[in-house]
Amino acid sequence: MTREQIIIELERACRTLRRMKFPKNGAPPKVESALGCHLPEPMPDRNTAYGADAVKMTRVLPTMDDLDHFDRVWPWLFHAPMRDRGLVYVRLAYDMGWRKVGRICDCSHEAARYRFEEAMDAIARAI
């Protein structure tokens, strides 16, 4: 399997992970539920005044094929060095540029790219 194929497969698995729902109490509570009725009444915005509501985006849940693919491919990530797993996930799941990945992982963009390449080499050797 080539490095490009590994990157494509891991990218699909990372995006599947992003589409999964949080387990109950897996995410921080919303402000409304934490404060109860002590919140001030929200001011109506101009869209509500004219009868237009904001569009609500619904999350597309992963299919069974996506979950099977995730279960097959996700363990590959554990062949990468531990310090580089988060870097690989951020790069593949969010399709960020190297400078942003470097800022998130607290390194330069050249170091982020080099560590990503090393992680892909380690995964390719292991599988």
Image: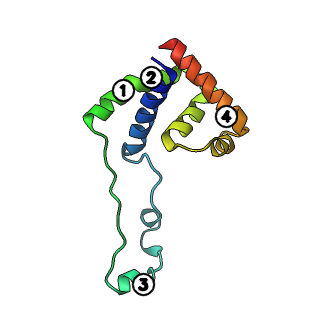
**Residue 126 on image: x %, y %:** 51, 13
Q: Secondary structure at mark 4?
A: helix
- From the image, tell me which residue sits under label 1: 71
- From the image, tell me which residue sits under label 2: 75
**Residue 83 on image: x %, y %:** 64, 28
Q: Secondary structure at mark 3?
A: helix
- Three-letter code, disc 1: Asp
Q: Secondary structure at mark 2?
A: helix
Q: Looking at the figure, which quarter contains the N terminus? A: top left
Question: What coloring was used for the rendering?
Answer: rainbow
Task: Mark 1 or mark 3: name the one nearer the start of the chain.
Answer: 3
Q: Secondary structure at mark 1?
A: helix
- Three-letter code, disc 4: Ala
Q: Is residue 44 visible?
A: no
Q: Is residue 43 above or below residue 121?
A: below
- Residue located at (27% from left, 38% from top): 63
Asked if disc 1 and disc 4 are in contact, CB closer than 8 Å, the reply is no
Of residues 33 and 43, which is closer to you in this image?
43
**Residue 107 on image: x %, y %:** 72, 38
- Three-letter code, disc 3: Arg
- Three-letter code, disc 2: Pro
Query: What separation in Å lies between label 2 and label 1 (alpha carbons)?
Result: 7 Å
Task: Mark 4 or mark 2: name the one nearer the start of the chain.
Answer: 2
- From the image, tell me which residue sits under label 4: 112
- Residue located at (65% from left, 43% from top): 104
- From the image, tell me which residue sits under label 3: 46
- Residue located at (67% from left, 28% from top): 114
Q: Is residue 56 above or below residue 74?
A: below
